[in-house]
Each structure stands twice: as C-alpha cells, then as structure tokens.
Amino acid sequence: MLGRFQGVEDDFAGQFDELYRVAYRAAYSILGNRTEAEDCSQEALARALVRWRRMHDYAPAWVARVSMNLALDRTRSARRADRLAPSRPPTGSGDGYDLAARRRDLAVALSALPRRQREAVALRYLADLPEAETAGAMGCTVGTVKSTVARGLDRLRVELGPQWALED
C-alpha cells in the first residue's frame, strides 16, 4: 500500500479483531440489531485506520466511542422516521418486543444525557472498558470518570424509572 498507510496496516491488522469486538459490543448494546451494529463497527474501524498514527495508543476506547455515537445517530434517525410515520400499536408483547422496547428506551435515555456523561457511561458499561482506558479516551482522570459515570447512572435511573434495574 502506498502513501500514508505504509507500515500502518500491519499494526492495525494486529489489533483489528479486538477493536472490532469492542466496537460491535458498543453498537449492539444500543441498537440490538446485528446488521446495524456491524455497519457501525465497520465505519468506526474505517475511521480508525485513517487516524491510526495519531490514536493507536487509545484505540479501543476511541473505536468504542465512535461506534457508540454512530449507533446513537441511527436511533435518532429511526425516532425521526417513527414520528413521521403513522402510529400503530405494537404487534407483539413477547420477549423480542420487550427487549427492543428496552433498547429503544435506553437509547433515548442515553441521548438525553449530557455528552460527557453519555460517553463515560457508554464506554464503561456498554463497551465494557476499564476505567483507565475510559479516562484515556475522554482525556481526563480516573476519578473524573468515576464521578461522571455515577452522575450519568443516577440520571439514567431517574429517566428510566424503577422498572429498569441498572446494576453497576
């Protein structure tokens, strides 16, 4: 490969499987749809390759954050489309519908959080990153991550109500 990707591809390829797993998990936890989660993961990894030289030290956190943001953008687009479409009652009340409804509620509640709280909660719990990696991705200290996550979880508990059992 010529140009700016020369020498970068081996380093990126060595971390690709782990990065894809992190990105997919972050997107799937918001979307609940494999195909859309794969699309978000692939887009996040494509963006990572372009920026690899600048961000490879904190790549898992960065990829998780980008994938999560892409997934949230998709849920916002779907909500706008739902508002424009004629409303219909849900056709089923089984576990599949309940899971889809819970994911939608979580995505709506996450999008209502301030940006930093949303990033911290998503990186810590949806992407399952350790506090240190989350702090690196957000450019803050571990203590800031802890307090931001705590405030974000408190707001999510208020938004989602008691029927949602948010476990730390």
Image (tube, grey):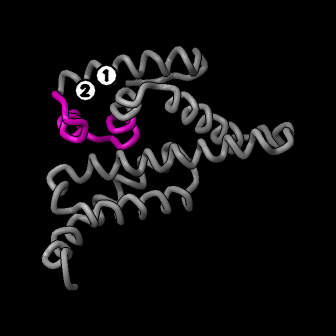
Q: Which mark is residue 145?
A: 2
Q: Nearer the viewer, residue 87 or 14?
A: 87
Q: Nearer the viewer, residue 95 or 108?
A: 108
Q: Residue at x 18, y 39 (%)?
A: 136
Q: Residue at x 37, y 26 (%)?
A: 117
As drawn, 41 above or below 106: below
Residue that numbered label 1 is attached to: 148
Q: Residue furthest front?
A: 3
The quadrant of the picture occupied by the C terminus is: top left
Decide: few, some or many residues near mark 2? Use Cα within 10 Å; few <14, some 14-19, many ≥20.
Answer: many
Whether label 1 touches label 2, CB < 8 Å: yes
Q: Which mark is residue 17?
A: none
Residue 49 placement (x, y as % from top left): 27, 66
Q: Is residue 46 left or right of residue 165?
A: left
Q: Residue at x 25, y 36 (%)?
A: 138
Residue 38 placement (x, y as % from top left): 48, 61
Q: Amino acid at mark 1?
A: Thr
Q: Please, what secondary structure does the residue beneath circle 1 have?
A: helix
Q: For residue 91, which quarter of the picture?
A: top right
Would you say residue 132 sits in the magenta stretch?
Answer: yes
Q: Amino acid at mark 2?
A: Val
User: Is most of the magenta stretch helix, strand or loop?
Assistant: helix
Q: Residue at x 57, y 49 (%)?
A: 74
As drawn, 147 above or below 80: above
Question: Where are the magenta residues, as a range?
Answer: 122-141
Total number of numbered discs in the rendering: 2
